[in-house]
Image (cartoon, helix red, strand yellow):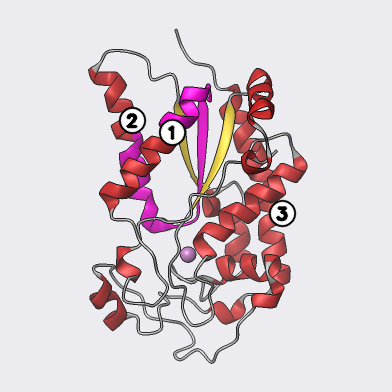
Amino acid sequence: MHLHLSTWAEVEQFLQRSRVIVVPIGSNEQHGPTGLLGTDWLCPEIIAREAEKRAEILVAPTFNIGMAQHHLAFAGTISLRPSTFIAAISDWVRSLAGHGFEKILFLNGHGGNVASIEAAFSEIYAESSFAARRAGVALKLCNWWDLEGVGELARDLFPTGHGAHATPSEIAITQWAFPDAIKLADYAPLIAPSGPIREALDFRARYPDGRIGSNPGLATPEKGRALVELAAQSLVRELEAFGSETQPD
Ligand code: NI
């Protein structure tokens, strides 16, 4: 079930059966010479959609703009600063928790989001902690590449040249979902340099074509399909485990 394709009455009925919802969350940012700008929000959305075909889960609209300040020197990147991102996540959570959702799993597709998502969770929990009351909502962050088995599969598929940004695994997933949008380029060097991430102009100087440590030329739609199928199965299990967690009195 998809929230955006449901009516309020259907969501009310869903809440009688389950209090769990998954929110795909990512970023709209450059992904090297061949990666789609939407890669980091498309990957969790694609995986959540496949999981939804396999189990009765509720998928929220994708939170598709994240913390990508370091990519702003490349055209097409849209970023929220950390404070804006944290405030927006908090309002999404308050909205959903207000309707009765008690378990909210954020399926994340962008490493640069992790610190701010965790900070948002702490801000939300802090409101309850300082007021000495129960939060009534449990929050979970799950990066799609950390879903059970996915890291191992990515290492098997891409023993070298996986890297950290514009990786062949994320490119492969978008190639499988959007074969008409596959782009080609000559990568030079074949494997991009690695190093630190700071502000946007420093990033562009270190990583001129936008990649970090990766060779996206290794991506194929077939490898993407294998990653999505495994990730979708693991997500279903993750949601089941999260949903059956009991709250102590
Ligand atoms: Ni990415």
* Disc 2 residue type (three-letter): Ile
**Which residue is identified by label 3?**
229
**Dot 1: element:** helix
Query: Does residue 65 lie above or below 57 as drawn?
Result: below
Query: Does residue 82 lie above or below 18 as drawn?
Result: below
Q: Residue at the spot x=53%, y=25% of the render? A: 101
Q: CA distance from mark 2 to mark 1?
A: 8 Å
Quadrant containing the C terminus in the rendered view: top left
Q: Residue at the spot x=24%, y=69% of the render? A: 199
Q: Is residue 83 left or right of residue 39?
A: left
Name the front one of labels 3 and 2: 2
* Disc 1 residue type (three-letter): Val
Q: Residue at the spot x=66%, y=18% of the render? A: 16
Query: Does residue 40 lie above or below 209 as drawn?
Result: above
Q: CA distance from mark 3 to mark 1?
A: 28 Å
Q: Are marks 2 and 1 in contact (CB under 8 Å)?
A: yes
Q: Residue at the spot x=31%, y=20% of the render? A: 128
Q: Is residue 101 left or right of residue 130?
A: right
Q: Earlier in the sequence, mark 2 or mark 1?
A: 1
Whether residue 84 appears in this view of the structure is: yes
Quadrant containing the N terminus in the rendered view: top right
In the image, which residues are magenta?
93-121
**Which residue is identified by label 1?**
93
**Which residue is identified by label 2?**
124
Can you name the residue that lies furthest to the right here?
Answer: 54
Query: Does residue 82 lie above or below 138 as drawn?
Result: below
Q: Position of residue 7 (x, y in %)?
A: 67, 33
* Disc 3 residue type (three-letter): Glu
